[in-house]
Amino acid sequence: MLQDSPSSAAAQLASQTSSPAKQGQEALFERSQQVGRLLLQGMTALHAEVLPPGSGPKRAADHIGQTVPMASRILKALSASSPVGALHLFPGPAPLKRWVKAAGRKGAEAGTLKTALDAVDEFEALIATEGGDRAALDAQLVAWLPEARRTLELRRRQAVFRGLSELEGASCTLDLSTMILRPSADGQRVDLCCIQARTGIVALRPGTGIKFVTERMTAEGVERHPLSVEGAELEQVGQGVRLDAFCDGTPAAVEVAHYGDRYQYILRTPTFGPNASSDFVLAEVNPGEFELRGAGNGSGAPFFSQLIQLPSRYAVLDIILHRDLVSKLEPELCLYRNFGESQARPGDPLRDVDRIDPLDGVQHAHGALGDQRLAGFTRYGEMLEYVRERLDWDLDGAVMYRAQLDYPVPGTQQSLVLHGASF
């Protein structure tokens, strides 16, 4: 939800970190580069002596007498763009030794064979001293290999998703928070429409209650008057109005309670089992939610956050801004680990230790709301257009900023910071 981030002066404190960790990382990188170069040199020289020119995985495996998958990994490593990338792609020391010894039986010279085996020994020593095992070393190496990091993290997050879905007894396809903002009619404030949705909710056991909590904070003293998308007054903030017409699955029952600025939603699915799914879509309008202060007003940058609480395949945070609110705006994606703590404020130096380096940046989208697409929500664009029509808001030329996580780990917070915003 939208909040003010701390001042840039406070944020600068976070950059004044001690250097031992950085020095250790640099030392690991240099040693990994060295070992990677040794392996590249040793294996390249070995192959030059024993493999027919232009050998692919199948031909190399048949000639050496080893498996095709092993040959494929080794040849792929030898074509890597960097020594660290090669180190990540090579199989472990044990299969490498088998390959080298098998190549030796094909007539490699003793000196070439020794060079290759010495390089494998260095690889084994690196694993033992820096990682403890191969998986731990790979987890460190991917810090310098964005694509490898993406693959490794996605596999691990998929495993976490499967495990937690079984342990918690529930999961969903999409965890969605959408915020639509436009200048109020009086030109002094900003109106907000907040849409919360969970699609593809699966409860593995009967009676499973699925809870998620949102936190909404603005300046002190702001009184809210929540409305439905048709303009009807609601009894309380956070109650919202269900949009069951846009649910693909069976609409889930929901109980809403609020405690100060925290709003708790408990979903009760009418069905259970891996093949039965439910959906939940809720919309609420808060006129005059924020003060329109003008760009460069000197206040901290506003931001919206989404805390992942349920195992999900996708978590999406969409911010849709009226064309008059996007001038000089620069969005930034911030990720945090947030287990049982209050919402992290981007720029707070006390929470820098919880920050996660994002793999992807902020996505930008233009065009009519009805044309927007979203995995896991078949009628997303249609729902947005329905809400716009009921609100009677002029959103021609609106800009959408999106943050998306695939298989996010529960306890992850993603925030979109709107630097240069006028509210």
Image (cartoon, rainbow, N blue to C red):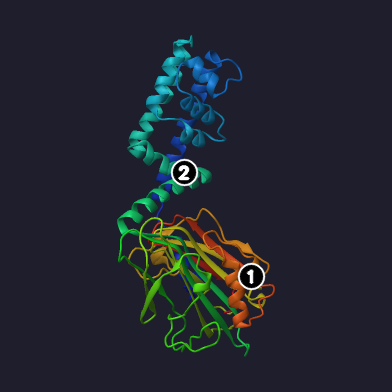
User: Whole-percent x and y of residue 304?
Assistant: 50, 71
Q: CA distance from mark 2 to mark 1?
A: 38 Å
Q: Residues within 10 Å of mark 1 (few under 14, many from 20)?
A: many
Name the image quarter holding residue 421.
bottom right
Whether 194 is drawn above or below 357: the answer is below
Whether 26 is drawn above or below 189: the answer is above
Residue at 36% of width from left, 30% of height from top?
Answer: 125
User: Whole-percent x and y of residue 256?
Assistant: 37, 78
Q: Nearer the viewer, mark 2 or mark 1?
A: 1
Q: Secondary structure at mark 1?
A: helix
Amino acid type indicated by mark 1: Leu
- Residue hosting label 2: 142
Q: Nearer the viewer, residue 206 or 257?
A: 206
Residue at 60% of width from left, 62% of height from top?
Answer: 373
Whether 123 is drawn above or below 276: the answer is above
User: Whole-percent x and y of residue 221?
Assistant: 44, 89
Amino acid type indicated by mark 2: Val
Quadrant placement of the C terminus: bottom right
- Residue hosting label 1: 369
Is residue 379 visible in the rendered image? The answer is yes
**Residue 90 falls left or right of residue 125:** right
**Residue 211 falls left or right of residue 280:** left
Q: Are marks 2 and 1 in contact (CB under 8 Å)?
A: no
Q: Secondary structure at mark 2?
A: helix
Report how many numbered discs are placed on residues in the image: 2
